Image (cartoon, helix red, strand yellow):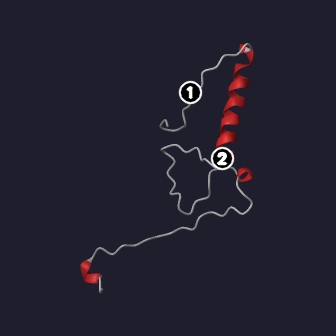
C-alpha cells in the first residue's frame, strides 16, 4: 500500500495502444468490482476511521440487503487502584 492509495502492478500488452486510457480505466473498474464483490475494502494507511461503528466503504450495491453498520463500543478500564473496590 502506498501512502494514499493502493498500488498494484499488472504487466500486459495490447495491440490497441490508442485505447490505452480506456483499457486502464476498464481494468481499474474491474479490479474494484472484484474487491467489492468479495467484501474487501480498499483502504489506504491514511484512512483514519475506526472500523468500530462505521459503515463499510464498500458501495451499498455490493453489500447484503441485511447489512447493518457495526455498533460502536467503548471499553473503559480503570487503572486507578484507589477506585477499584474489588
Q: Quadrant of the C terminus?
A: bottom left
Q: Residues within 10 Å of mark 1 (few under 14, many from 20)?
A: few
Classify 28 as above or below 70: above
| Labels 1 and 2: the sequence-earlier one | 1
7 sits to left or right of 36: left
**Above or below for 56 versus 73:** above
For label 1, the SS is loop
Place residue 30 in its image quadrant: top right
Q: Is residue 18 above or below residue 35?
A: above
Which tag is nearer the camera, tag 1 or tag 2?
2
> Who is closer to the viewer here, 22 or 15?
15
| Residue 3 placement (x, y as % from top left) | 47, 37
- Camera-nearest residue between 5 and 14: 14
- The answer to whether residue 59 is left or right of residue 85 is right
Give the SS element for disc 2. Answer: loop
Q: CA distance from mark 1 to mark 2?
A: 20 Å
The quadrant holding residue 54 is: bottom right
Residue 12 position within the rendered picture, expressed as x and y whole percent measured from the top left: 64, 20
Mark 2 = which residue? 38
Local packing at callout 2 (Cα closer than 10 Å; few below 14, some 14-19, many 20+) is few
Seen as rendered, the residue at the extreme bottom is 85
Q: Position of residue 9 (x, y in %)?
A: 56, 27
Disc 1 vs disc 2: Cβ atoms closer than 8 Å?
A: no
Q: Which mark is residue 24?
A: none
Residue at point 59%, 64% (across, down): 70
Residue 38 at x, y percent in the picture: 65, 47
Residue at 48% across, 45% down: 46
Residue drawn at x 29%, y 82% is 84
* Numbered circle sitting on residue 9: 1
Amino acid at each position: 500500500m502506498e501512502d494514499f492509495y493502493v498500488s498494484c502492478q499488472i504487466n500486459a500488452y495490447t495491440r490497441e495502444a490508442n485505447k490505452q486510457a480506456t483499457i486502464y480505466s476498464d481494468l481499474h473498474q474491474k479490479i474494484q468490482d472484484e474487491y467489492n464483490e468479495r467484501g474487501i475494502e480498499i483502504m489506504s494507511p491514511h484512512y483514519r476511521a475506526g472500523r468500530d461503528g462505521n459503515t463499510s466503504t464498500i458501495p451499498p450495491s455490493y453489500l447484503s440487503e441485511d447489512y447493518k453498520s457495526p455498533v460502536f463500543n467503548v471499553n473503559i478500564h480503570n487503572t486507578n487502584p484507589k477506585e477499584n473496590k474489588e
